[in-house]
Image: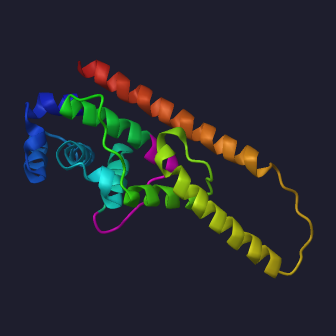
């Protein structure tokens, strides 16, 4: 998308106001999804907001996942979308700044958001690309596990139920699904980049 934008809008478009980019994209026959993706690229290239604001990070994840970016109605990205977004943010940042060696670190706010989203989705071990949230995730999961154990202890006993898979197996399966999604999305991104070069 970055190279396509360079071709469509010309060099230096990352310094434009978002409204100008949207106007020019629409004038060139672009789509709302493209507007969202280019807005995400602008946020990465010019402000760095996705590294320090959870709202910006979530919006970029939605845009890069081709989901609707709704300013008034929030749709949280899924764990696999967040993991793939981190990889793509790093790639876009390197293309925009021409500095592959330096990538900003995520703020405590983004770290907390990602950890909470993972815990909410029942994931207790962060995927490789979301490693920065692991320590906070462990604290959340421990608190959640304690609360769940207390709730189970307070509930009247019920008949035994079969557990189809141990929790470790479920977690390993979910992490593998996320890795596969990230791999496929990265392959798609690389194919797009090659076709534009």
Location of residue 97 (image quadrant): top left
Left or right position of 143 against 149: left
* Residue in the image at 75% along x and 44% along y: 169
* Residue in the image at 31% along x and 58% along y: 53
Give the image location of residue 153, x and y in percent: 82, 76
Is the C terminus in the top left, top right, bottom left or bottom right quadrant? Answer: top left
Location of residue 122 (image quadrant): bottom right
Give the image location of residue 166, x and y in percent: 80, 49
Q: Is residue 68 visible?
A: no
- Is residue 21 depicted above or below 117 in this figure? above
Q: Is residue 68 magenta?
A: no
Give the number of callouts.
0
Is the N terminus in the top left, top right, bottom left or bottom right quadrant? Answer: top left
Task: Give the image's coloring scheme.
Answer: rainbow
Pick out the residue farthest to the right.
159
* Residue in the image at 33% along x and 60% along y: 55
Give the image location of residue 45, x and y in percent: 20, 42
What secondary structure characterizes most of the magenta part? loop
Location of residue 142 (image quadrant): bottom right
Residue span colored magenta? 71-83
Q: Nearer the viewer, residue 163 or 96?
A: 96
* Residue in the image at 44% along x and 47% along y: 82
Q: Is residue 77 visible?
A: yes
Left or right position of 52 against 123: left
Give the image location of residue 121, x and y in percent: 58, 57
- Is residue 124 depicted above or below 147 in this figure? above
Left or right position of 197 against 6: right
Q: Is residue 78 magenta?
A: yes
């Amino acid at each position: 998308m970055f190279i396509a934008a360079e071709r469509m809008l010309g060099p230096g478009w990352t310094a434009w106001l978002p409204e100008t980019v949207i106007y020019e994209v629409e004038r060139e026959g672009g789509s709302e999804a493209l507007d969202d993706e280019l807005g995400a690229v602008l946020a990465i290239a010019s402000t760095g907001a996705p590294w320090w604001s959870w709202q910006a990070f979530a919006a970029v994840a939605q845009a890069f996942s081709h989901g609707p970016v709704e300013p008034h109605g929030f749709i949280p990205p899924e764990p696999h979308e967040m993991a793939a977004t981190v990889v793509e943010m790093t790639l876009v940042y390197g293309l925009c700044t021409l500095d592959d060696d330096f990538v900003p670190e995520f703020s405590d706010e983004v770290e907390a958001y990602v950890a909470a989203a993972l815990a909410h989705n029942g994931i207790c071990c962060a995927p490789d690309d979301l490693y920065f949230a692991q320590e906070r995730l462990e604290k959340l999961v421990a608190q959640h596990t304690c609360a769940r154990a207390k709730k189970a202890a307070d509930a009247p006993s019920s008949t035994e139920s079969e557990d189809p898979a141990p929790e470790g197996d479920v977690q390993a399966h979910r992490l593998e699904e996320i890795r596969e999604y990230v791999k496929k999305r990265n392959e798609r991104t690389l194919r797009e980049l090659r076709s534009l070069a």
